[in-house]
Image: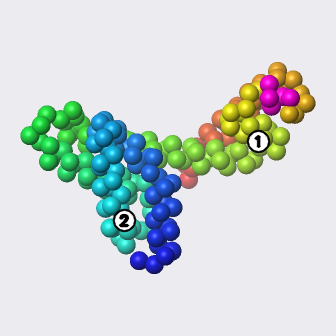
């Protein structure tokens, strides 16, 4: 495998590792079991990297492999009582993948909407969500805390409308 493919694999895995791990935790509940399954999943992803189609989304592909590991894990543990019936696991797997996909779509739309904000509004929102208090932001921008609260409220409404609009447009296209 050439260097570019190594880099692409690493980037996609790093970008999606928390989501794949969360998916595993939702299926097996026990964090230690999920960690072991995550390691197995990563190894299988790497071993099958040549089969991955870059035109497709990485996350569903990774979840499919993770799901197979969960099923194999459950088969091996059949002599012990399971927390979830295998049929329940099957039912949980599909909506969980869709939910993570929708969350990713919302995040992409939010990033696009943030870019469209006026610079002052965007900077205020970024400062606030990076942990600065309203008082700190108001002092830095020579305005009142009340004005910052109002600005944040207006920006939240704008972002909500923008994200909703983008998701609706995407759903109808």
Above or below residue 65? Residue 130 is above
* Residue shown at 14% from the left, 43% from the top: 77
Rendered location of residue 73, percent (x, y): 20, 48
Above or below residue 80? Residue 143 is above
- Residue 11 shown in magenta: no
Check disc 1 and report the residue beneath it. Answer: 122
Rendered location of residue 97, percent (x, y): 39, 46
Q: Residue furthest bottom?
A: 2
Rendered location of residue 28, percent (x, y): 28, 39
Q: Residues within 10 Å of mark 1 (few under 14, many from 20)?
A: some
User: For the residues carrying marks 1 and 2, which lies nearer the camera in this image?
Assistant: 2
Precedes in sequence: disc 1 or disc 2: 2
Rendered location of residue 53, percent (x, y): 42, 68
Asked whether, in this view, residue 49 is left or right of residue 79, the answer is right
* Residue shown at 19% from the left, 40% from the top: 86
Decide if residue 85 is in sight here.
yes
Q: Quadrant of residue 1?
A: bottom left
Q: Residue furthest right?
A: 142
Dot 2: element: helix
User: Is 52 in front, or is 6?
Assistant: 6
User: Is 75 in front, or is 95?
Assistant: 75
Magenta region = 135-139
Dot 1: element: helix
Magenta stretch prevailing secondary structure: helix
Query: Which mark is on residue 24?
Result: none
Query: Which mark is on residue 46?
Result: 2
* Residue shown at 58% from the left, 45% from the top: 107
Number of marks present in the image shown? 2
Q: Residues within 10 Å of mark 2 (few under 14, many from 20)?
A: some
* Residue shown at 76% from the left, 41% from the top: 122
């Amino acid at each position: 495998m050439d260097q570019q493919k190594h880099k692409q694999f690493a980037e996609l895995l790093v970008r999606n590792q928390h989501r794949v791990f969360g998916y595993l935790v939702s299926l097996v509940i026990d964090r230690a079991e999920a960690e072991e399954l995550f390691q197995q999943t990563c190894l299988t992803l790497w071993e099958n990297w040549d089969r991955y189609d870059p035109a497709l989304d990485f996350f569903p592909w990774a979840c499919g492999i993770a799901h197979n590991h969960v099923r194999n894990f459950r088969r091996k543990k059949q002599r012990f009582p399971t927390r979830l019936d295998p049929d329940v696991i099957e039912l949980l797997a599909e909506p969980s993948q869709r939910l993570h996909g929708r969350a990713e779509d919302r995040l992409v739309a939010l990033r696009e909407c943030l870019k469209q904000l006026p610079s002052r509004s965007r900077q205020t929102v970024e400062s606030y969500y990076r942990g600065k208090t309203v008082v700190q932001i108001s002092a830095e921008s020579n305005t009142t805390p009340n004005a910052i609260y109002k600005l944040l409220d207006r920006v939240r409404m704008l972002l909500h409308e923008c994200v909703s609009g983008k998701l609706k447009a995407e759903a109808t296209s």
